[in-house]
Each structure stands twice: as C-alpha cells, then as structure tokens.
Image: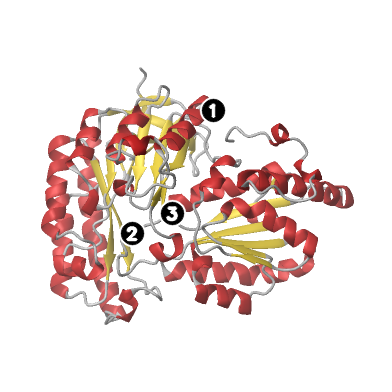
Amino acid sequence: MKPFDINNYGNLSELAYPPTDEPLRQIYFISRLQGILAKKREKLGRNIRFSVVTFGCQMNAHDSEKLEGILLEAGFEPSDEENADVIIYNTCTVRENANQKLYGHLGQLKARKKSNPEMLIGLCGCMMQQEDILDYIKEKFRFVDIVFGTFNVFMLAELLCRRYEENKQVIEVLREGTRSYENDLPENRKYSFKSGVNIMYGCNNFCTYCIVPYVRGRERSRTPEDILDDIKRLVKDGVTEIMLLGQNVNSYGKKYMDESSIVAENPDYDFPTLLTDVCKIDGIRRVRFMTSHPKDLSDKLIEVIRDNPKVCRHMHLPVQAGSTRVLQAMNRHYTRERYLEIIDKLRKEVPDISITTDIMVGFPGETEEDFLETVDLVEKVGYDQVFTFIYSIRSGTPAADMEQVPEDIVKDRFDRLLKVVSEKARERVGRFKGTVNEVLVEDIDSHDDTMVTGRMNNNTIVHFKGCAEMIGSYVNVKLTEEKGFYYIGELAGE
C-alpha cells in the first residue's frame, strides 16, 4: 500500500463540518466511514466484505487500486465478488460488449441484493460519464446505490458515507476535474514490486471511433515533481518496475495541472525528458510506458529508449488500420507510410525491440482493398503481438453516423486477419527460443502451482518451474519451448 496513515491527521471525524482542503476532506470521510463500519461489525458479528471488479484498460486498473486502498483503510474486508457485501464495478465504455457485460452483472445482483440487507452496489468509471448510459442506469437499475465517474474516484468514502447515513441512492458524476487529489489517498497495489503511475489524464486526439476524450476529458499532465516523488516513495516501498500511464504518453507536457513547477523554468520538458529522469532514480530496474500514439512519437524518444537499458525493449504502438484512407477517416493524423517509417527507425536504433499493436477491423467505409492493406502492413512489420478488435459503434462519436460495414463481411475479415496475425507473431516471438533472458517473476502459474509466471524485459510472458518465494525477484531463464505468444522455460542460474 502507498505510504499513508490516517492517524497522522488526528480524529477528523469529530469536526463539525468537513474540511475545505480536498485531501483532508476525503480523509475526514474515511474516518467517518470507519465509525459506521465499526457499528455494523458489532451488530452483525462479522466484517463487511468488498470486491472491486475492473473492466477495461490499465488506467482503470490503477484507479481500482485507489478504490481498494480507500475501502481497506475504512475497514472493509476484501472478498471475491460472489461473497461481497459491497461491490464496485469500475467500468469501460470503449466497446459495446463492455456495456452489455455490466448490465448482465447487474441483472444477476438484483436478487442477491434483496436477500442481503448489507449489500451495496457502486458503479464508476468511463461508462458513467455518458449521459445516455447514466439515464439508462437510473431508469433500469434503481437498486444501484452509488454512481460516480472518472473525475471523482477519490470521493468513494464520502459517497459511501452519504449512502449509509441518508439511506438513499447517491449519484455524483463530475464533468471535469484535475484528479490530483487522489494522489494523496491510499491505494492497494496488486503487486508489491511493480506499479503503474499516472503521468497524465485525458486525451486530445478525438479519433472518430473513440469515446475516451468525452469521458476522460482533455489532456492534463501531472508535474514532473509529483510524478518523481510518487516513484521515489514506491521505490522505498519495494517497487523495482514502473509503468508510466497515460492515454497518449508521447504528448506529455503540453498542458500541466500546475504550471508553478519545474516546467515554468523549462517549457520544453517533454516525455523523453521525464523518462530520462525516472531512469535516474536509484532502485528502479525497469521502466515501461503505455500508450504511445504514432503521431507524437519523436526521434528523441527513440534515442532515450536506445541509450537507457532501464527502459524496457517493448513498444505498444497502435496502428488501428493499414490503409491511409481509413486512417484519415479515423482522424489518426498519420499515414501508412509514416507509420512504417517509425517502425524502421525503432528497429534500426533498437534492434531487439518487441513491437505490439491494436488493429480494428470493420471501421465504417472499410473496403476489401483497405483491409488487404492492413494485412500487408501486418506482414511487413512483423509484430510480436496484435490485439485485434471488431469496430464497435459508440454513440456520440462521428463514426457512429458513418456507413457501417455488413456484419458478415467484418466477421470474415476478422478471421482472416487473425490467421495472419498468429502466423507472423509466432515467427517473430520464436526468435528467442534457446536464449537465456532475465525474467521478473510475477505470480504462481494459474494452471500449475509448481510453476511461476514472469515477464521478460520485452514484455513476453514466460512460465517455468518455481515457487512463491521467487515472486518479485529477477532470475535468468532459458527459453526452451515457444508457444505462440509465450514461452516455457527453465531456470538457467546466474
């Protein structure tokens, strides 16, 4: 857990009114919530259990760590979803199936809630920032207890207090905000040895298929001082691998939350500069980042990756389509040719780099010729892994009003692309077979408890014989069997 001790602030719950300082205000409500839960434990003779269920991207997962940190600090007990009294769904709205998945979960909870008077259901995240979805939730799922959005994750304790004390539904969805307050609150990290760190929030790109700028707002970068201080605290807590998070990390530094910082003296402070400064922190062994937009990937960033061994040899560079015509319709701001130039530069300067991508099939107006250009690009680049998606209509985006490609054609193209992707990725990943690589051990293998799972510097997953004591350590592993997107290996010693 992030260094945090509510006792440092005294008994804030005894104040007549909540403090006006936002971090202190939320600590005040955590303290109030502790008192509420103490009475419930005494009455029921047991703890109140919680589960935070996350849909979507790594930024959502990092938000969920903050939600869990608040709940643990307040006195809730962690549990699985099936046995939880308080369930928080942190939602994603990038694709339509994410919405349907949430509605299915809510439908199943309705009967459980009737039989458990302590059950509370909370909804937060990107879905809640859409007015039409929020109206649908209000109409169809009135048994939901609290609803909040991407801009007020830090308010969880306050919203729960209001729900318990007022005994009515609480909906608090902010339409904008800095999100900086939550950096002063507790978090419950999944791993003790690695952690994500938000360097910015929001997105300015407005791709025609994407809802993110509408639900996460415009780009705002955290100051370098705040980011570096967070990472130094994490290092003291045992973290050796950092993932820098943002919707488009390459545009870091264009607009700051707080201009009264180092950037006032250095207006050219950009992502490559930040990445260099992060690598200077003693104790950090690996640095990753997610996600990069091709239109903003600079030669300067490529040079930083090349020259600094702490920066992991992995670049996730979403292309979305291999046709310039489609890329223009998507408002991606680069051409097929420009993307291939970037790939050539990366491979020239960092020959061992692994490149992964996202590709969308069936974007409105996509022709067979457009699709074949995408297939050709996959063959030319030789990705280590491709995350393929079928275009999903998102209401409120320009692409929703464009001419849609028939479903049967999209399905056929998706299957054809998947075959090419699998073949090329196997060829690319297979280049490491027989070599010895450093692996950070992350967990016990989910299918075989005599094995552990870890990641190479280039993000390739490796499974090998090991035990729980190895988790969090860096070991040398010989890659003996290639399995498409991962390896089976064996310990190779020092």
Identify residue for label 3: 57
- Mark 3 is surrounded, within 10 Å at the Cα level, by few (under 14), some (14 to 19) or many (20 or more) other residues, namely few
Judging from the image, what secondary structure is the residue with disc 1 in? loop
Quote the CA–CA distance across marks 3 and 1.
25 Å
Identify residue for label 1: 237
Judging from the image, what secondary structure is the residue with disc 2 in? loop
- Mark 2 is surrounded, within 10 Å at the Cα level, by few (under 14), some (14 to 19) or many (20 or more) other residues, namely some
Q: In the rendered image, which quarter contains the C terminus?
A: top left
Specify whether 390 is left or right of 162: left
Place of residue 362 in the rendered image (x, y in percent of width and height, measured from the top left): 27, 72
Specify whether 58 is left or right of 173: left
Q: Give amino acid for label 3.
A: Cys
Place of residue 191 in the rendered image (x, y in percent of width and height, measured from the top left): 52, 37
Q: Give amino acid for label 2.
A: Asn
Q: Nearer the viewer, residue 467 or 315?
A: 315
Q: Residue furthest top?
A: 494
Judging from the image, what secondary structure is the residue with disc 3 in? loop
Quote the CA–CA distance across marks 3 and 2.
18 Å
